[in-house]
Amino acid sequence: MTKNKPNNTSKGVQWKNSLSPQAIEFTQPSIMLKMVSTVDDRGWPHITIITSNRAIADDTIVWGAFTEGSSKEHVKKNPKQGILYMTAEMPFKFMQVKVEFEQIKKEGEDLEYFNNTELMRYFTYVRVHTAFYNTVVAATHVRDLPLLGIISGIVKNLVGKSGLRTGLDEKRLNPIGYKLYTAPIAVRAIAYVDPTDGYPIIIPCIPLQAADHNRLVFPVSSNKLDLFQIPEDAKVAVHCMNFDFANQVVKGTFTGIQKSRAIKFGVIEIEEIYNSCPPIYGVIYPPERRYERPKVTNFHL
């Protein structure tokens, strides 16, 4: 399969075409944040958490499916993906990878490995049933996510985010989503499609919050080199998860950097909201794209 040459010229962010031994080891813990971003039929990024996910060689990453969702369908049509690995405890460290889907396996040692990890071994009715194998196209080195930048972002939100409210009567975020996106601390990340090669990139952005029910904002306080690479008017996907594992994906347009009370914020206009929690996965906003679960009318054993 012919692959586009990855973008490795982002200012200050260096990409390599394979994983180092240290990078491979970094992906191994089962208890860490592991996100995968795919591209849908519209060319919009999608983002999800896939914890059964690790490098098995310097050029191969495998992740496993135990539920059915949009990401598994996206990669069959567009194999380009972005992956984020981030430690679960401070000091936070993270690594970004661009990969291309190659093949599926329904059995083998990788599935056995995933089903025997700390997260999965005690599940009786849920098993990792499919392994998705992906070729590494580009990867950053393991980087620090400074605590000072996170704290600074929280303070800047307190001062400036209210100045970026839309004033709209509509409430696109439902009560669960609004609570998730206004919590001072939660796991949040932004995905966008790199225009130079078509691969998604995921950026951790913990200080990102909702200015109101219709707009997300993030202070440019950490990962500045990454955040300034998001093109204006790009479609983005934002994943937010709290410490009770409630989560929701918001998609929309990044309209650029604005100042509010002398503080620079990135601004995202909410256009679509995706429920990524069981039992029903799918779009919940806008209403015309809302997923409606089929009614069961035929009961039999």
Image (cartoon, rainbow, N blue to C red):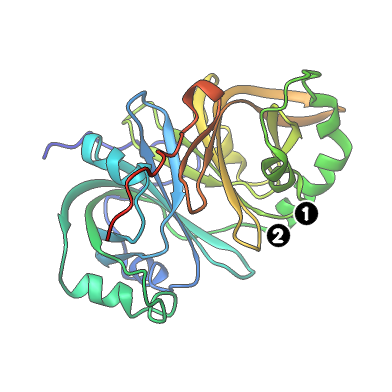
Q: Which residue is mark 1?
A: 151
Q: Residue at x 78, y 19 (%)?
A: 169
Quarter containing the N terminus: top left
Q: Which residue is mark 2?
A: 147
Q: Residue at x 18, y 75 (%)?
A: 109
Vertical relation: 129 (above or below) 38: below
Toward which corner of the image does residue 172 lie, by quadrant? top right
From mark 1 to mark 2, how far is it between C-alphas?
6 Å
**Where residue 190 sits in the image (x, y, percent)?**
54, 40
- Tell me if 47 is positioned left or right of 267 in this view: left
Any mark on residue 115, and which? none
Vertical relation: 59 (above or below) 221: below
Residue located farthest toward the left when viewing the structure as drawn: 1
Toward which corner of the image does residue 217 lie, by quadrant? top right
Q: Secondary structure at mark 2?
A: helix
The amino acid at mark 2 is Leu
Q: Secondary structure at mark 1?
A: helix
